[in-house]
Amino acid sequence: MTRQTTEAAFETVIETHLLANGYELEDRDGFDRERAIFPETVLAFIRNTQPNEWAKLEALHGERTGEQIINDLCKWMDANGSLATLRHGFKCYGRTLRVAFFKAAHELNPELEERYKANRMGITRQLRFSTRSEKSLDVTISLNGIPVATAELKNPLTEQTVDNAQRQYRQDRDPREPLFEFKRRTLVHFAVDTEAVFMTTRPAGKATYFLPFNKGHEGGAGNPPDPAGRAYRTAYLWEEVLQRDSILDLLARFLHLQIEEKRTDEGKRIKKETMIFP
């Protein structure tokens, strides 16, 4: 079988489900490869949800307002990471701008509810991410224009499995590319086939370490058969984990940047950072 009838069909299954459940198509042509964001989507979200802040910045910068905001956002994410930026916003000329709004503890504030509903979860297929080549990612998930997850998909019918997807990340995904730089943009990367899922939060070339992201089956590894009787044992990934409210909740409360400080035998202090995806 050709990729057209197997892996492309796998992409379609995921895309169709997400689009029917609150996601929107994020056009791959709108991706800024150097900055690793969808800038027009970011700006539209800020403009629509924070019109007062936008107006005050526009009074200062005029037609350059969007450019100034994107420059400051990318510098902020490079310095502080995308997770902290999604949760707490960033500074632009002394004003705090938010690039996401998460669910309030209660529903008594209509404005917060409206801002939460304004979040745009996007899906992009075959995203060309590099300034140096035309390589593409099977699936990219973004929040208000900021990539948060990628996935490489394989189908055993093509004699390709999750092992090949992991190999693709290790061999063909340069961790120096802006999209793959640890914590600065995308937070998690999934290697997926119809039977199993593995994930990593830190692309590191050949040293990339993947963890199983499976449910387990009968006391062992892997996944149980799909209760709906379909061919995908890994449907929980897009039907549960990436479900709109679920991924927003994960980003808001459960992802964690773990920081450890140690001293070498020479007394030098070193810092180790690990992104924990539950």
Image (cartoon, helix red, strand yellow):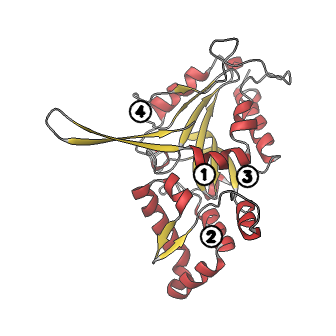
Q: Dot 4 corresponds to which residue?
A: 205
Q: Secondary structure at mark 4?
A: loop
Q: Dot 2 corresponds to which residue?
A: 46
Left or right: residue 129 versus residue 47 is left
Three-letter residue code for mark 2: Ile
Closer-to-camera residue (6/239): 239
Q: CA distance from mark 3 to mark 2?
A: 19 Å
User: In the rendered image, is residue 35 in sight?
Assistant: yes
The residue at 58%/44% (across/down) is: 254
Residue 25 - label: 3
The residue at 66%/69% (across/down) is: 44
Task: Establish if 104 lies above or below 176.
Answer: below
Labels 1, 4: front one: 1
Q: Are marks 1 and 3 in contact (CB under 8 Å)?
A: no
Q: Are marks 4 and 3 in contact (CB under 8 Å)?
A: no
Task: Establish if 48 lies above or below 229.
Answer: below
Closer to the chain start, of discs 4 and 3, is 3
Residue 252 - label: 1
Closer to the chain start, of discs 1 and 2, is 2
Closer to the chain start, of discs 3 and 2, is 3
Closer to the chain start, of discs 2 and 4, is 2
Three-letter residue code for mark 3: Leu
Residue 96, position in %: x, y?
A: 52, 72
Task: Establish if 106 lies above or below 208.
Answer: below
Labels 1, 2: front one: 1
